[in-house]
Amino acid sequence: MPYKFPNYLKYADTHEYVQQEDGLLKIGVSEFAIDQLGDIVFVEIVEKGTPLKKGETFGTIESVKAVEEVYLPFSGEVVFVNEGVIENPEILQNDPIGDGWLVIIKPESNFSLDELMNSDEYKSKVVPN
């Protein structure tokens, strides 16, 4: 399967993607990582209003193969949780970059997207030449 690596996303080493929108950060998991997990059966995400520090876990994704934690690339407060993905994990499986985002956070003021990989850097890390 050819994976999409949209240029408008930034990526963490732990396979989360970040999209900046109106001062907020939409966070999800890359197509590559979702594909590696296989069939997703359960998604758990922290509650709206939860303050988290960079590197803390904000949820878990359970597949038939494994249970993986998802990590916050920046400190901030969770302002939206994608309840649809919790209720129907197939959304994450079928459209991780579109409707399958996980949370939106209001980042602390001292964050920089430059700390993350661009799409080309991430692609070269996960897809062999």
Image (spheres, rainbow, N blue to C red):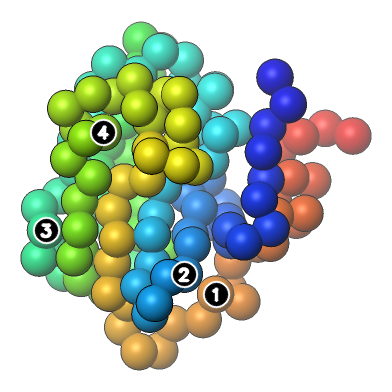
Residue where numbered disc 3 is placed: 48
**Under tag 4, what secondary structure?**
helix
Q: Which amino acid lies under the numbered mark 3 shown in the image of this protein?
A: Lys
Total number of numbered labels? 4
Q: Which residue occupies the extreme right position in the image?
A: 129
Q: Which amino acid lies under the numbered mark 2 shown in the image of this protein?
A: Gln
Kindly indicate whether the residue at mark 1 contacts the one at mark 4 (C-beta within 8 angstroms).
no
Residue where numbered disc 4 is placed: 85
Q: How far apart are marks 2 and 3 (CA)?
A: 18 Å
Residue beneath the point at 46% across and 42% down:
98
**Under tag 1, what secondary structure?**
helix
Q: How far apart are marks 4 and 2 (CA)?
A: 20 Å
The location of residue 111, given as percent across then percent down, is: 44, 82
**Mark on residue 20?**
2
Q: Distance between the residues labelled 4 and 1?
A: 25 Å
The location of residue 16, given as percent across then percent down, is: 47, 49
**Mark on residue 113?**
1
Which is more N-terminal, label 3 or label 2?
Answer: 2
Kindly indicate whether the residue at mark 1 contacts the one at mark 2 (C-beta within 8 angstroms).
yes
Q: Distance between the residues labelled 4 and 3?
A: 14 Å
Q: How dense is the environment of label 4, judged by Cα within 10 Å: few (below 14), some, or many (20 and up)?
A: many
**Under tag 3, what secondary structure?**
loop
The location of residue 113, given as percent across then percent down, is: 54, 75
Kindly indicate whether the residue at mark 3 contacts the one at mark 2 (C-beta within 8 angstroms).
no
